[in-house]
Image: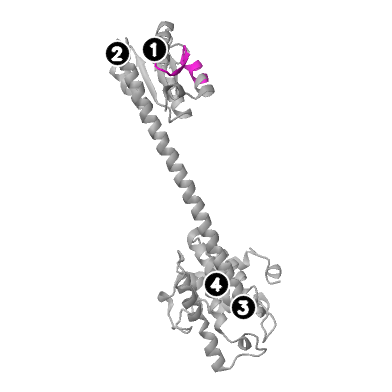
Amino acid sequence: MKNNELSILCIDDEEMIRMMISDFLEDSGYTVFTAENGLSGLELLRENHPDLILVDLMMPEMDGLEFLSRAVKESPDTPIIVISGTGAIQDVVEAVRRGAWDYLSKPIQDLVVLEHVVNKALEKALLTRENEAYRKDLEEKVRERTLALEKTLWDTVSALSSMTDKRDPYTSGHQKRVSILAKALGEKMGLSGDTVEGIRIAGLLHDIGKIYVPAEFLAKPARLEYEEMEIMKKHAFMGYDILINIDFPWPVAEIVYQHHERIDGSGYPRNLEDSDILPEAKIIAIVDVFEAMSSHRPYRPSLNPEIALREIVENRGKFYSQNCADAFIELFQENSFDTDEFFK
């Protein structure tokens, strides 16, 4: 950057020193603003946003140390060089402590030294600003890329979820409602936002494996026979098989694989027991049962949500995780959602 594109604020109560410094720096190509004390210096700082500041320590109205403290807060990236004739080492230490970049003693015998110090400070400041600009630009690109990837992910999830609804219109909306309930339960249990997000996605996809189940089984107006039910049970594995090759940042495929497991080992397809079941799958298991019982099915009308809740109450600690069930019961009792509206 050329010198004539840079500006310097010189603050000193001695007019002769202000004129000497400003004339020299202007001859070197800098734009120079001058002020006779810290108070007027702050006004010029706010109005002109100089690239560098030279400030005396001993001044009326507002001395250099007070100016330093306030200027550093208002413009932390602007280098400030203290010029003073006090000769006290404690002043140097205090000036640096308050944010000064460098320190020069009066009288300045050789203005070339001043120019050297000014140039070095500006070079360092400009490099810092360039790095900061690069960092911000990189962060913005990362943010944009992250948003694009998140959109792609959600487009994929939505497409997969809608496939199941189209395949099984009698339970259309089931996965969406399970997702909403599972998210609410995860939040109720105090899980991290990232974990809850994974649960929400798993809820939207937990029945994706049903696209491999014969349509006549899904729409049958009577309970399935044993052989038909055994085929239906395969949807948990088929869902896992579909999702395992998608690079989710959460164990979505495994959650889907486990959402019909029960903590006493009586679930399917692998008869997993309590400690082998993911916490996220335990949450999906509860809300899946509750939503399924509370919604219409081809072989029966919807049941009252109170009846569905009774299933959770009576089997907590047996089929369903005690902690998850207790939290779900509290969620239901708090009337956190309108069940009539929810199951429309």
Marks 4 and 2, Cα distance to the nearest angstrom?
74 Å
From the viewer's side, name the closer residue of 341 and 149: 149
The answer to which quarter of the image holds residue 304 is bottom right
**Mark 3 lies on residue:** 292
Q: Judge whether residue 232 can be spotted in this image.
A: yes
What is the residue that sits farthest to the front in this orientation? 2
Eyeballing the image, is 139 above or below 49?
below
Marks 4 and 1, Cα distance to the nearest angstrom?
72 Å
Which region of the structure is painted magenta? 28-43
Eyeballing the image, is 134 above or below 327?
above
Neighbour tally class for label 3: few under 14, some 14-19, many 20 plus, Cα within 10 Å:
some
**Mark 4 lies on residue:** 205
Q: Secondary structure at mark 3?
A: helix
Q: Nearer the viewer, mark 4 or mark 2?
A: 4
**Mark 2 lies on residue:** 87
Q: Position of residue 35 (x, y in %)?
A: 47, 13
- Of marks 1 and 2, which one's residue comes earlier in the chain? 1
Q: Nearer the viewer, mark 3 or mark 4?
A: 4
Marks 1 and 2, Cα distance to the nearest angstrom?
24 Å
